[in-house]
Amino acid sequence: MTMAFQALRKYASAVPRAPSCIKILPEVANALSAGRPVVALESTIVAHGMPYPQNLELAKDVSRILRNKGVIPATIAIKDGVFRAGLHPDELENLSMAGEEGRAIKCSTRDLPLVASKHSREYSSEENTQWGATTVAATMRLAHAAGISTFVTGGTGGVHRGGELSLDISTDLIELSRTPVVVISAGVKSILDIKRTLEVLETFAVPTGTWKSDEFPAFFSPKSGVKSPATFGSAIDVASAYLAGRELGMANGMLVAVPNHDPAGTAVETAIQEALHEASAAGIEGRDVTPFILRTVAEKTGGDSLRSNMSLVKRNAEVGADIANSIVDLTFGRGKEEWAQSSQLQSSSHKPRVVCVGGAVIDTVAKSSAENEMIIGTSNPGSIHVSDGGVARNVAEVLGRLGSKPLFYTAIGNDDGGRGILARLRNECGVVTTTESAYVSEGVSTAQYLALLDHRRDLVGGVADMEALSQIPVPSMEELRGVEFLVLDSNAPVETLTRAAKNGVNAGTRVCFEPTSIPKAQLLSNNHEFLECLTYTFPNEAELFAMAESLSDGVVFNEGQNSSEEYKPLKHAASKLLSKMNSENPHIIVTLGSRGVLLASKSDSSSTPVFKHLPATAMSDIKSSNGAGDTLCGAFIHALLQGASEEEAVRFGQKAARMSLDCAEHAISPDVRYHH
């Protein structure tokens, strides 16, 4: 058993279940129980660290940064006497206003039992909610009690200037000496004595280092003139050191200081020195010093200090997310037999009913303004949005949101973008990935796709960088035994898709194919070995014609659209394709945009295909068509798993697709999950 896994065992045995007095947000509790990364966030910075609404904006930005890297945020606070690990959005907003309204008190470790006993645990209105805003020390203590090992903040406390006489030393240093949490900050606050703070941390045996620098930062400035005790070159370095300490049974935490390279740093440092003199002259001391300094410096610098403070917290969140992910990766992610046997994600005892193989892609969607018709050949006003995409990934997300728990095979680059895609699929959608199914490709970036939509939200064109997908792994016949559906998109090489399809057929699995694009549809339709494996395929109108024409030596099928027989060219093309597919009940689901879906089916007892047109419900405002077809595909397969007929499954898929058509922010609407 490896050191990292032993460290986890000792860590798990050393930390009891979260005390009943701590209320953990279900999202946070689920992530912790599944071994997924969680980062704790302090509440003092929200309630007292900066004014409203900038504090709320920062809290939302930090949460977004963490989630984009596959990490669940958990704000630590005390609400009406109850210790909390994780807050709902409305609670976070209430907390952000509580400081200025006098409803939040600053709480260090010593204050925790006092605040908990003082406030009522009975329901209170939003206007009367009383908050305990936790400092670094209190946040560490509650985070550790909740089972969270990584904590992101702005700056930590330390030894105050003149501390050799006053003995004014922050509890943060004491807590670092006795609570095993990795604290990521911009160093100790610049109003403190940095050199003496590092000496105290050394005395308390707290591993301390700077992120990619040999000089310890001065909070607002990366330069302090003080040499750092250690340098961390990567998140893996931090995670390895943390796990090694846990293996040794060390109870202390770790401090990772991230230099703030915001250009306003020098001016802010000058203002801090001036504010320190003013605080001393006014007799301000103790816990009141920091809020006074921050307010005064903000005034002196015209807001530069606030902007720099917000910038450094966001940077700390980026580094903290990488560290949290690395701790999980080192503990669970290297094919350890112990984890493979115990993890729900990799357990063979939970055989998936659906396997999806294909692209995991970073989608960038550029939309022309809906107010003006798009002009080709020049710049157009509009909006640009980045999200997770890839046809197989989209289908897997739909299946996961609907509860079908598919296993996803793909390849990503060794980068944050790819890791984030997989983490969000696991954490938010219930999609399963394993170290065997998700190949990490060195030397190339995670696949990216750029789509251009016109003013009607129809696709004008796109550009794809899919080199990483050439290394998508092939599920073996053994791995596909017992699987009911194998879903393939055309992003993998033809050889990969053919092998996967044949393995699926030999394992008794129904093979489904999403063509993805016209060129890829034509390429694969020329592969008869591949086509004869297919039970279901989901082309749009143009892709169907392209596939049929490739099978007929270029014969044009889309002529005669004005024929008296409705959809005659489509039916002719579908019949040609059905004749080359799996001989046992093949089906083609042709998506026709606003005209609905044409379902073409053929039974093994008849040579004549059966067609059914299912019209679409009219929509007055389509926000994006980018993921509608993939939504229909995933929902169709989910419905079949529930025992629906093909016609019933199409109708269910159309309902789900409408949700994605009404979603501007994502290819797949998060609302799909509510329509099982």
Image (cartoon, rainbow, N blue to C red):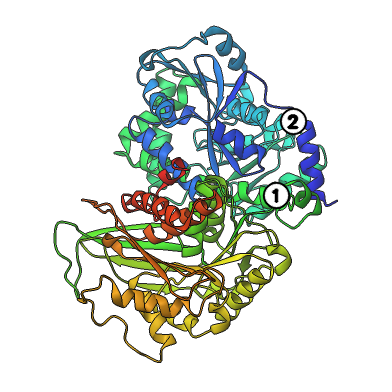
Amino acid under label 1?
A: His
**Does residue 419 appear in the picture of this structure?**
yes
Percent of width and height locating residue 436 = 69, 63
Q: Nearer the viewer, residue 183 or 129?
A: 129
Residue at the spot x=74%, y=50% of the render? 349
Percent of width and height locating residue 386 = 39, 58
From what the image shows, is residue 154 above or below residue 262? above
Q: Nearer the viewer, residue 538 or 74?
A: 538
Q: Return the disc, 2 or 1, that comes first in the chain's sequence.
A: 2
Residue 503's disc is none
Q: Which residue is mark 2?
A: 15
Q: Which residue is mark 1?
A: 350
Residue at the spot x=44%, y=22% of the render? 280
Q: Secondary structure at mark 2?
A: loop
Percent of width and height locating residue 655 = 37, 49
Amino acid under label 2?
A: Val
Residue at the spot x=65%, y=51% of the render? 326
Badge 2: few (under 14), some or many (20 or more) residues near its Cα, within 10 Å?
Answer: few
Occupied quadrant, residue 14: top right
Count of numbered marks? 2
**Does residue 315 appear in the picture of this structure?**
no
